[in-house]
Image (tube, rainbow, N blue to C red):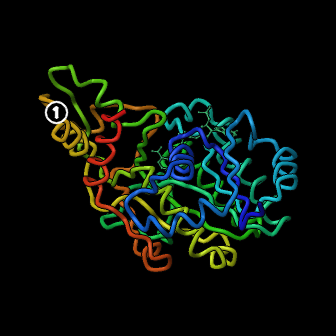
Amino acid sequence: MSYELNILVTGANGQLGSEIRYLVMSDELGVMNENDLKFITQNSKFFFTDKSELDITKKEDIKKFVEENNINVIINCAAYTAVDRAEEEKDIADLVNHKAVKHLANTAKERNIPLIHISTDYVFDGENYKPYVEDDPVNPQGAYGLTKLKGEEAFKASGATGIIIRTSWVYSSHGHNFVKTMLKLKDRDELNVVFDQVGTPTYARDLAHAILEIINKNFEKIKNKKAEIYHYSNEGVISWYDFAKAIFEIENIDIKVNPIESKDYPTLAKRPHYSVLNKKKIKNEFNVEIPYWRESLKEYLQRINNG
Ligand SMILES: NC(=O)c1ccc[n+]([C@@H]2O[C@H](COP(=O)([O-])OP(=O)(O)OC[C@H]3O[C@@H](n4cnc5c(N)ncnc54)[C@H](OP(=O)(O)O)[C@@H]3O)[C@@H](O)[C@H]2O)c1
């Protein structure tokens, strides 16, 4: 069988990569445009790789893999995402989030194939008072954000085509995330959660869906973009405190959640106080529909409760 596209997904065991894999492998393509997505999942060949199959810090391995499998598009979900640990492991974070992105982008450029790269709201300092647009000035506050920013810049400098999607507060059925942490703490009498960090959660399955939809309907368009940046999270605006409250409310868990200030919950890495992303550009250019955060959270909790 010959395929329309050979799609490489790196970091495929992580939160986002696993959700892409889930959508591709299952018949259940999510809530939006189900029929449309069947085209890409049935007519493309996906290569799901994580560190053990393809370590993105190894330049020659990337080249070889892309050539041998005649890859037409790379979705880079691989990253070093331990925000606090990155302060102590700056070199490793830089290797994965910056230098490896350079290798991927250079290979993409050489092969003339687009790269879809994922970045973060933590490139911003959080001093804004309204949702960040793509060309707002960046000013990362920690090592993670800085290495991710350098990754974006390396992609731009490579001359490769494709897009960068900045996202925020990701949770998924796979891996570690805030929702799972809250659920693990559910037997406590009370919990303190910061209310002065405001943003929007992103259900990784929604983002995975959006990425597949963009490739499916806009492949020609992304082939002509030069590392163009887009923002994607769920819709709405909340603090981590509100997020915790919503998780417990939806799950009918009786627990007292106390709003606290970030200064009373010291972490190694400084986080932006405000990192809401404006999604107008991705919605307008690619016709992506974005669910409201609470609807996605409900769907997610239902899924994990059903095993
Ligand atoms: N998580 C968030 O809240 C958040 C927020 C904003 C933006 N983002 C961005 O969204 C993207 C996806 O994040 P995620 O939450 O899905 O991350 P994740 O769950 O940490 O997944 C990243 C995956 O990449 C793998 N990886 C690490 N080093 C690698 C290497 N050298 N070669 C190949 N694979 C490697 C990891 O393996 P190991 O686990 O074995 O290291 C892991 O499976 C990332 O670009 C991240 O920066 C995430």
Q: Residue at x 34, y 41 (%)?
A: 303
Q: Position of residue 129 (x, y in %)?
A: 30, 64
Image location of residue 94, percent across then percent down: 67, 42
Q: Could you tell me which secondary element the residue under label 1 belongs to? A: strand
As shown in the figure, which amino acid type bears the numbered disc 1? Val
Residue in the picture at 20% in, 20% down: 188
Taking the spot 67% from the left edge, 45% from the top edge, the residue there is 48
- For the C terminus, the quadrant is top left
Q: Residue at x 39, y 65 (%)?
A: 32
Q: Is residue 221 left or right of residue 240?
A: right
Q: In this rendering, is residue 155 above or below 65?
A: below
- The residue beneath circle 1 is 257
Q: At which x and y percent is residue 104?
A: 75, 54
Quadrant of the rendered image holding ligand 1: top right
Q: How many numbered discs, if any?
A: 1
Say whether residue 15 is left or right of residue 147.
left
Image quadrant occupied by the N terminus: bottom right
Which quadrant of the view contains residue 111?
Answer: bottom right
* 52 and 178: which is toward the camera: 52
In the rendering, at what x and y percent does residue 243 appear?
25, 44
Residue 227 as seen in the image, left or right of residue 144: right
